[in-house]
Amino acid sequence: MPRTTSSRRRGPAAVVLLVLVAAAVGLLVWWRADSGSDTAPAADAGPTAAAGTTNSAGGGAPATGTRPAGSGATTAPAGDATTSAAPSSSTAATTPAATGTATTSSALRTVDVTTTYAGWDATAGQAVVNGFVSGVIEDGGTCTLTVTKGDRSLRGEAEGAADAATTACGDVVVAGLGSGSWTAVLSYRSATSSGRSAAVTVVVP
């Protein structure tokens, strides 16, 4: 009789133990399944993050949809900047110097000089040339007689005087000539005008 009672007590205990073991196994299986579903997305996200890190650190092309830092600032190409900054040789206009202005304003007016007499005054021992200046009526100009023969040249002067229509030189004389033919030219010069006559000949006996 005692053995029968012990066997009956062991039966329910074994059943309870089996139930606990089964429950533990099921709980373990459920826990692993739940853990696997939580960690799987993290594993999938890993390559994406790594790819993004590689592109940023390695200097490669940025991932699609990712805007590189500082891309908002537009930088003109170096060649364009140089072209726009370079000064054009034709832009800086230089005003030429008015080289002819002073010369034109200070140039003397050309006038005509005419001889009315050219000869030798034996009594005075000098060449005499008389003439006048056309185109100007003024006092203060100088009438100059230049006589030349070979390499010799002599000169005499007289002051011009205004008359009704011209400037008269009067008689302009040169002394000290030797015998022979001399070429004589009467010229005129003042602050406003200048001119010279055609050459004439003075014969000294």
Image: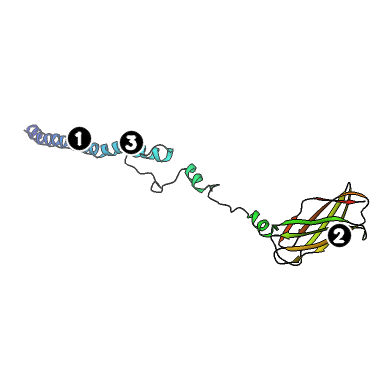
Mark 3 residue crowding within 10 angstroms, few (<14) / some (14–19) / many (20+): few
Mark 1–mark 2 distance (CA, rounded to whole Å): 150 Å
Could you say where residue 72 lies in the image, as x and y percent from the top left? Answer: 38, 48
Q: Compare residues 12 and 76 and report the one nearer the observer.
A: 76
Mark 3–mark 1 distance (CA, rounded to whole Å): 29 Å
Q: Compare residues 48 and 60 and report the one nearer the observer.
A: 60
Q: Amino acid at mark 3?
A: Pro
Q: What residue appears at the point 74 percent right and 56 percent down from the top-left corner?
A: 113
Instruction: Please state if 120 lies on the left or on the right of 90 as rendered.
Output: right
What residue is shown with label 2?
Answer: 173
In terms of image quadrants, where is residue 188?
bottom right
Could you say where residue 23 lies in the image, as x and y percent from the top left? Answer: 15, 37
Instruction: Please state if 138 lies on the left or on the right of 13 as rendered.
Output: right
What residue is shown with label 1?
Answer: 29
Could you say where residue 158 lies in the image, as x and y percent from the top left? Answer: 82, 63
Answer above or below: position of 9 versus 131.
Answer: above
Q: Amino acid at mark 1?
A: Val
Which SS class for mark 1?
A: helix
Q: In the rendered image, which quarter contains the N terminus? A: top left
Instruction: Please state if 70 lies on the left or on the right of 153 as rendered.
Output: left
Q: Please report whichever mark, 1 or 2, sits nearer to the chain's N-terminal start.
A: 1
Answer above or below: position of 128 versus 30.
Answer: below
Q: Compare residues 69 and 128 and report the one nearer the observer.
A: 128
Mark 2 residue crowding within 10 angstroms, few (<14) / some (14–19) / many (20+): many
Q: Please report whichever mark, 3 or 1, sits nearer to the chain's N-terminal start.
A: 1
What residue is shown with label 3?
Answer: 47
Q: Amino acid at mark 2?
A: Val
Q: Compare residues 136 and 54 and report the one nearer the observer.
A: 136
Which SS class for mark 2?
A: strand
